[in-house]
Amino acid sequence: VNKEGLRGISEQTKTMEPTADIGTFSLVNLGMYGVKTAAPVIIEPQSCILALGSITPTVKPGDSDGEYKYGKEMEVTMSCDHRVVDGAVGAEWLQAFKEGMEKPESMLL
């Protein structure tokens, strides 16, 4: 396990040459196998990993008594290396991701 602080990691990255094994963000799609949720584990040199679960139909209470809303939900879990990404920043990113998934037209230029 790398126990260097942020300064040490920063110094290392300044001297690194670009290679295929350097990354920042990983995505794991287990939903395509019917998995509802997952707990992703960060593999160095990644700073975050996002796990996507399956899309499931849902029924929720509507606006008035006896009314129901039908929809779909997908569980998403993100793990962050807190030496690189602060938890609050990760939460803000997840909020933007959620908004983009709920209203994909908002991502158009």
Image (spheres, rainbow, N blue to C red):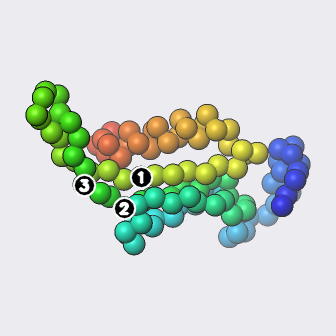
Residue 73 or residue 105, whichever sits in front: 73
Above or below, 36 relative to 83:
below
**Pointers 3 and 1 in contact (C-beta within 8 Å):** no
Taking the spot 85% from the left edge, 58% from the top edge, the residue there is 2
Amino acid type of disc 1? Glu
As measured in the structure, the alpha-carbon distance from the residue carrying label 2 to the one carrying label 3 is 10 Å
As measured in the structure, the alpha-carbon distance from the residue carrying label 1 to the one carrying label 2 is 7 Å
Q: Quadrant of the N terminus?
A: bottom right
- Residue 58 in picture, x, y percent from top left: 25, 50
- Would residue 3 appear left or right of 46 to someone viewing this image? right
Q: Which mark is residue 57?
A: 3
Instruction: Give the number of marks.
Output: 3
Q: Quadrant of the C terminus?
A: top left
Check disc 2 and report its element: helix, strand or loop: strand
Indicate the quadrant where residue 34 lies: bottom left
- Would residue 71 appear left or right of 6 to someone viewing this image? left
Residue 45 or residue 17, whichever sits in front: 45
As measured in the structure, the alpha-carbon distance from the residue carrying label 3 to the one carrying label 1 is 12 Å
Taking the spot 51% from the left edge, 52% from the top edge, the residue there is 77
Residue 60 or residue 17, whichever sits in front: 60
Q: Which residue is mark 1?
A: 75
Is residue 43 in view?
yes
- Would residue 78 appear left or right of 60 to someone viewing this image? right
Check disc 1 and report its element: helix, strand or loop: strand
- Residue 9 in picture, x, y percent from top left: 83, 51
Amino acid type of disc 3? Pro
What is the residue that sits farthest to the front in this orientation?
Answer: 66
- Residue 53 in picture, x, y percent from top left: 42, 59
Q: Which residue is mark 2?
A: 54
Taking the spot 35% from the left edge, 46% from the top edge, the residue there is 101
How dense is the environment of label 3, judged by Cα within 10 Å: few (below 14), some, or many (20 and up)?
few
